[in-house]
Image (cartoon, rainbow, N blue to C red):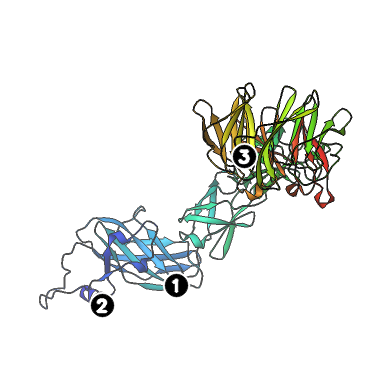
Amino acid sequence: MKRAIINLFALGNDYWRVPCDQLKANNKHMKQFSGILVLIFLTLSGCEKDAELQPKDYPYLITLEVTDINPTGVRFNAEVLVYGLDSIIDFGFVWYNNESQYHYSLYDHEGNTDNFTAKVQNNLVANQYYQCRAYIETTNQLVTGNEVGFTSSGSLPPEIVDFFPDTVTDGMSVTLVGKYFSPIVSNNEVTVNDISAEVVSASNDTIIFIMPEMAFQGNAAIKLSLNNQTISAPRTITIIGPEIHTLSIDEAQSGTYITVEGKHFLQGGNDLKLYFSDQEAEILDTIDKALVVVVPPPKNNYFDNVPATVKIVAGLKTNYYSGGFNILKSWYQHEPPPFTWNNEYGAFSYNGKGYILEIDSKQLYEYRPGNDHWYAISDYPGERFDRSVHLVFDDHVMIMGGVVSYSNKVRYVWVYNFTNNQWTQKPDLPFDFFRATHFRLNDLDYIITSEAEVWTYNQANDAFTQLNYFPVNFTYLGTSFVSNGVAYASTIGVNWQYDPLNDQWINISSNPFISESDAYNTSEFQYKDRGYIMYHGMDLYKFDTDRMQWIRASVFPASHGSTLYKTTFIIEEKVYLAVPDAQYQTGPFLFSYQEE
């Protein structure tokens, strides 16, 4: 009888062995095992002797018929005919159909390899046809038995026993612990609050998934669908979002730094935003329980205090601050200049008054803030030019250099004496420029030209001295200022710091100004020991020397700011922004900007 069984098994080509390194822990498809067909030959030693298997290193086994087929699962059965010489390190069954393949190891279960069996109660769909193979893995070989087909009557539904962590937010990993799961990742469909979650790993008793993005916060149900059956976790999971508890102040001007305290700010990853009504605030510092943010300018109303609703958004989650906040006004409107032209005027201040030289009428205009009125105080005797540099010292202003007709550079120098209302022409400059920026440091006036020349002017001896070249040329954006006794400059993309001992400019950081064309109509000024830029004539930035970066503080308070020429002068605590330009019938204007 033994001889007949072995003969049928051998002749049926049902015995396979493959290298053991093809059995992977993650249950690779058993159909991919590159087997070597092993024919079991009988050695006949006469009519009185039974056939005997020849000694081999690897074992021989046979897959028996599947039994106990019912709605709770099936039982797989196998018989080992020869153990072989190699050590056995695993044994069990694999089963598969056209869609999925599964692996069940008995190595860690009770039992032995003589006639091993396994009750399988999961991953079987009712009325589906499967094939099963027994296998044994040794230190050198993976040996599989013959295929046995069966039609399933189903199996036990999956069961979620527990999960962790209990409290999560979007993007976190959650582990389900239970029974009768599918080790095939794609077979397990997990939802949280009825939103599909990505399953990243699975085994018979563990599923790991990623929390999906959702606007919902609170307690949510976890559901698992497998083999046309859907179950729920025994309890809900708590989904958290950002919360605002307090603000360091409840009113401030735009550009002010405030601290927002709460919790769960970092739970949404990098996708965190804070809004004052519909205006997004710049976030400077972020920890899980506090944010440092810049109050943004309100929208379309710059001359009144504006109430704002503070809102935080992390991914799809939104929460609101329960208290109120007021964005205080920064801008005031005054009597506009009594002339209109689209020249690039220069402006300056002296003794509590503001001045603009109107180069077409050749009139020097004086603005008196006490009665908010302009006066023509002097006839200018010189030639017409603009984009000039204005240096105020003692009771004089020196107006130097610039262009005529937008492109022809001139070297004119004129001095106006406020005391006797006299103009004096001085010798021409030793240099010229298309544009220039200037600052005062250590009793010297520094002038940086758009052609990258750097000159100092010593008022004491009325002398110009050329220094080392500035690192780059510029067309529209080139600003310089002094803060805490240190000189800085900014050009497109780069912030610079001046080293006067070595006469060098050092690249210290980048900036958000990325286009020379966008810098057209840019205005600049120094105010309260800090540099300011109205980039592209619209967005007002201030330079933070602690962070070495430009912070958006406000916006031009009228329309068409990017197309209008502007000039500035400072009286006491206010920066006056004069807009003689009257294009689009929106000017002229005179605004003042003040930070409390």
Query: In the image, residue 485 lies at what x, y percent?
Result: 60, 24
Look at mark 2 in the image and give the residue it sits on.
Answer: 8
Between 436 and 432, the residue placed more toward the observer is: 432
Measured as percent of width and height from the top left, residue 450 is found at 60, 41
Inspect this view and state whether residue 547 appears.
no
Q: Position of residue 590 (x, y in %)?
A: 82, 38
Cα separation between marks 2 and 3: 105 Å
First in sequence: mark 2 vs mark 3: 2
Residue indicated by mark 1? 98
Q: SS at mark 3? A: loop
Residue at 60% x, 38% y: name it. 449
Q: Quadrant of the N terminus?
A: bottom left
The answer to whether marks 1 and 2 mark residues whose Cβ atoms lie closer than 8 Å is no
Q: Quadrant of residue 383?
A: top right
Query: What label does residue 122 carry, if any?
Result: none
Circle 1 crowding by C-alpha within 10 Å: few under 14, some 14–19, many from 20: few
**Amino acid type at mark 3:** Asp
Label 1 residue SS = loop
Q: Viewer-proximal residue, 443 or 485?
A: 443
**Does residue 268 sit above or below 349 in this rendering?**
below
